[in-house]
């Protein structure tokens, strides 16, 4: 089934990466359900569990995988297609990251490059990468590789802080990829330290400093700022103020980092999610008509149409 | 984005120059939520001093934009509009003064609301008044009104949501309501 699914070269391939710093924010939940949602629209979708240290996307989908991403990374299999597993859901396949050894959580640069290269060759219309928690280089590189980077935040200070840290880390890693000059890279490294003591507090400070060193690289950094437009989803919303958090973070990111974060929707806290997870079934299939499924549809709609969340997408209810 | 000190008031509030009053009000509310007190969206990124500066600038912008004349002067001073241009806000402001005098009709309230681009649903969620009562107020279905004390409260909230003169709206509309009561002998 899987080989049939991914036999033909699709017209267009889009890679979405779902990250967000903190653990337990719902990255795996969104990966699985957006994947199911897309597959039900007739799109050929591949889910990749890129949470190499702590994989569990397979459990969310209720499948077990014999071959995993670690077999590919370690070179036990040559082609990434060999670790694809069917999910039992039409149009949806999975590359599981399960059963990994600890050292695989931090693959070498060459291993990562081989993986990224082969991901780009896969015959799926949508490839969704479920990233691990934290700001490991692996998660950052996958996030930057994707056309669409999606961040999940919970309405609590710890989660917000971690999302900002993730944005900053991803952003400065992109800067380093763009700037090959060793002196400029040293300045970027310095700027990443919170209290660097050299007056480089915001990305704007950094860009100004780099522009003084090399106007060419300065322009490249400005272009990188412009191109970096992560999407934001607020998960487990419990009150109306939580809905506003997405807009507030959008504003704060523009003011501080100078980057345009796009707020694409929210999902209310819902026991149905917990129940679906306990049954190892994606919510989209388990309770397709529940409120959360409605929120998910808005989020997916915004992702596909490349639009942002609007007031019309607020699902009215009894929220405080 | 430019540094705060170099931003004009539209940039401070993150709105377009064509923004209507409702957009301005919403942008102001959002900015207050984002940068004041212990707001978790801005705490990790900005120092208390920076947040105080942002709030100060937002208040400045809001003070100017609240007053159609001051907004117009600001737009002219910044070169956003020519002196001869007719400012939409001023036009709206004048209309508001002429409409909202004496006895106030439900249709006048509806007109004011629509001018500000607010739907009844928006008003209902903002004021937490049942949308059926808002309908009744605008359509003057006076037989469906709640007790006068409640009606007075609703009118106050309605006026406040649209930034209309609360006293003028409440008294003007109640005057009309009392006339109806006398006519129908209620």
Image: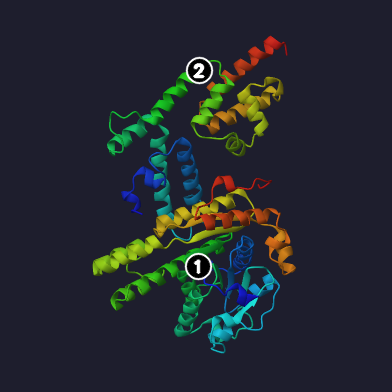
Chain under label 2?
A: B
Instruction: For mark 1, give the secondary structure.
Output: loop
Relative side of B177 to A144, left or right: right
Q: Residues within 10 Å of mark 2 (few under 14, many from 20)?
A: some
Q: Give the Cα distance between marks 2 and 1.
A: 62 Å
**Res. B38 visible in picture:** no
* Residue A83 placement (x, y as % from top left): 60, 81
- Tag shown at residue A13: 1
Q: Quadrant of residue A237?
A: bottom right
Q: Nearer the viewer, residue A8 or A260?
A: A8
Q: Nearer the viewer, residue B162 or A193?
A: B162
Q: Quadrant of residue A182?
A: bottom left
Q: Quadrant of residue A299?
A: bottom right
* Residue A249 placement (x, y as % from top left): 49, 56
State the residue position of label 2: B101
Residue A256 to residue A241: above or below: below
């Amino acid at each position: 089934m899987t080989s049939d699914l991914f036999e033909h070269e699709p017209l267009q391939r889009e890679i979405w990466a779902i990250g967000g710093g903190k653990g337990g924010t719902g990255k795996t939940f969104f990966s699985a359900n957006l994947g199911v949602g897309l597959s039900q629209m007739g799109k050929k979708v591949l889910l990749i569990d890129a949470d190499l240290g702590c994989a569990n996307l397979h459990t969310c989908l209720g499948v077990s995988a014999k071959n995993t991403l670690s077999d590919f990374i370690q070179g036990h299999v040559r082609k990434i297609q060999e670790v694809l597993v069917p999910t039992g859901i039409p149009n949806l396949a999975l590359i599981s990251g399960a059963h990994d050894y600890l050292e695989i959580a931090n693959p070498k640069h060459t291993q990562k490059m081989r993986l990224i290269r082969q991901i780009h060759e896969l015959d799926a219309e949508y490839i969704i990468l479920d990233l691990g928690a934290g700001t490991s280089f692996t998660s950052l590189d996958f996030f930057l590789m994707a056309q669409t980077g999606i961040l999940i935040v919970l309405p609590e200070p710890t989660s917000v802080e971690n999302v900002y840290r993730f944005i900053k880390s991803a952003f400065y890693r992109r800067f380093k990829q763009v700037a090959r000059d060793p002196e400029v890279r040293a300045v970027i490294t310095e700027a990443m330290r919170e209290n660097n003591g050299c007056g480089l507090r915001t990305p704007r400070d950094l860009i100004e400093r780099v522009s003084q060193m090399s106007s060419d690289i300065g322009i490249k950094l400005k272009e990188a700022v412009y191109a970096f437009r992560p999407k934001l989803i607020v998960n487990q919303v419990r009150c109306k103020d939580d809905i506003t958090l997405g807009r507030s973070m959008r504003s704060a990111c523009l003011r501080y980092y100078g980057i345009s974060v796009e707020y694409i929707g929210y999902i209310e806290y819902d026991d149905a999610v917990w129940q679906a997870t306990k049954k190892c079934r994606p919510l989209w299939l388990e309770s397709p008509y529940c409120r959360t499924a409605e929120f998910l549809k808005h989020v997916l709609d915004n992702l596909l149409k490349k639009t942002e969340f609007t007031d019309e997408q607020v699902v009215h209810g009894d929220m405080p | 984005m430019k540094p705060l000190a170099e931003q004009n008031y539209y940039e401070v509030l993150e709105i377009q120059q064509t923004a209507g009053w409702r957009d301005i009000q919403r942008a102001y509310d959002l900015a207050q939520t984002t940068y004041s007190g212990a707001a978790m969206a801005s705490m990790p990124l900005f120092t208390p001093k920076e947040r105080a500066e942002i709030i100060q600038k937002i208040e400045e912008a809001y003070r100017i934009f609240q007053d159609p004349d001051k907004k117009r002067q600001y737009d002219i001073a910044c070169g956003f509009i020519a002196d001869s241009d007719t400012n939409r806000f001023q036009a709206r402001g004048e209309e508001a003064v002429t409409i909202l005098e004496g006895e106030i009709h439900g249709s006048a309230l509806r007109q004011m609301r629509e001018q500000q681009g607010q739907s009844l649903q928006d008003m209902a969620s903002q004021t937490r008044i049942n949308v059926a009562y808002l309908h009744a107020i605008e359509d003057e279905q006076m037989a469906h009104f709640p007790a006068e004390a409640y009606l007075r409260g609703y009118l106050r909230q309605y006026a406040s949501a649209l930034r209309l003169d609360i006293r003028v709206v409440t008294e003007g509309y109640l005057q009309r309501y009392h006339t109806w009561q006398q006519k129908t002998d209620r």
